[in-house]
Image (spheres, rainbow, N blue to C red):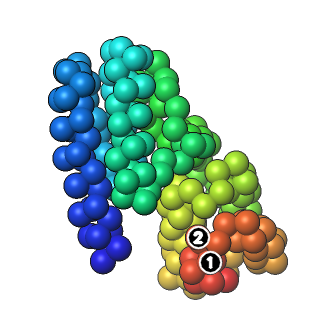
Amino acid sequence: TVDFIAEIILGYADLELTAKINSLNITDYHIIRYRDDYRIFVNSAQDGEKILKALTEILADLGLRLNPGKTFASKEVLRSSIKPDKIYWAKAQKHHEFLPKQLLLISELARDYPNAGSILKALSKFTDRLEALQKDKKAPEHILVLVSILTEIAISNPRIYPDYAGIV
């Protein structure tokens, strides 16, 4: 229900933004919004600034604000359109036969990108490997090492608590 309410509010914000952009006579732009993430593509830095200012004002009128840590301009369209944690994980993702090594990679991801969705995906794959061992009636080696690494990941990533509890 939270996503539904957010979609109604941000859908309204999108309509307001379109009207404002039209009143500013800006025509060379493209905006993509997924949930609460906006990607604004322009060929003119000035147009980008005007659109960003309009979006900021519209969101403020709705009691919302842009996250300054996630708001930036970039000339690298492809790279800046992909979240850094996803790029990191795509580069680092390797299937290690040794489970602690796989968890150490996940630990690095979690340290560099706390609470990122990529951590949950990585832990899901790790869980799949543990379940496969269970089906073969095998216990994972180095259980204390695995639990220690998982605990360290969970301490600074509350988003994974349910997954952590399920794995442990």
As rendered, which of 6 and 147 lies closer to the eye? 6
> Does 107 sit left or right of 39 as displayed?
right
> Does 155 sit left or right of 22 as displayed?
right
Position in image of residue 68 (x %, y %): 57, 43
Which image quadrant: the C terminus?
bottom right
Quadrant hosting residue 136: bottom right
* Residue 89 appears in the rendering: no
Q: Residues within 10 Å of mark 2 (few under 14, many from 20)?
A: some
**Measured along the vertical axis of the image, is residue 52 above or below residue 148?**
above
Identity of the amino acid at label 1? Tyr
* Residue 54 appears in the rendering: yes
Identity of the amino acid at label 2? Arg
Quadrant hosting residue 42: top left
In contact (CB < 8 Å): disc 1 and disc 2: yes
Which image quadrant: the N terminus?
bottom left
Which structural element holds mark 2? helix
As rendered, which of 55 and 140 lies closer to the eye? 55
> Residue beneath label 1, please?
161
**Measured along the vertical axis of the image, is residue 166 above or below residue 46?**
below
Q: Residue at (51%, 58%) from the top-left corner?
A: 117
Q: Residue at (49%, 23%) from the top-left corner?
A: 74
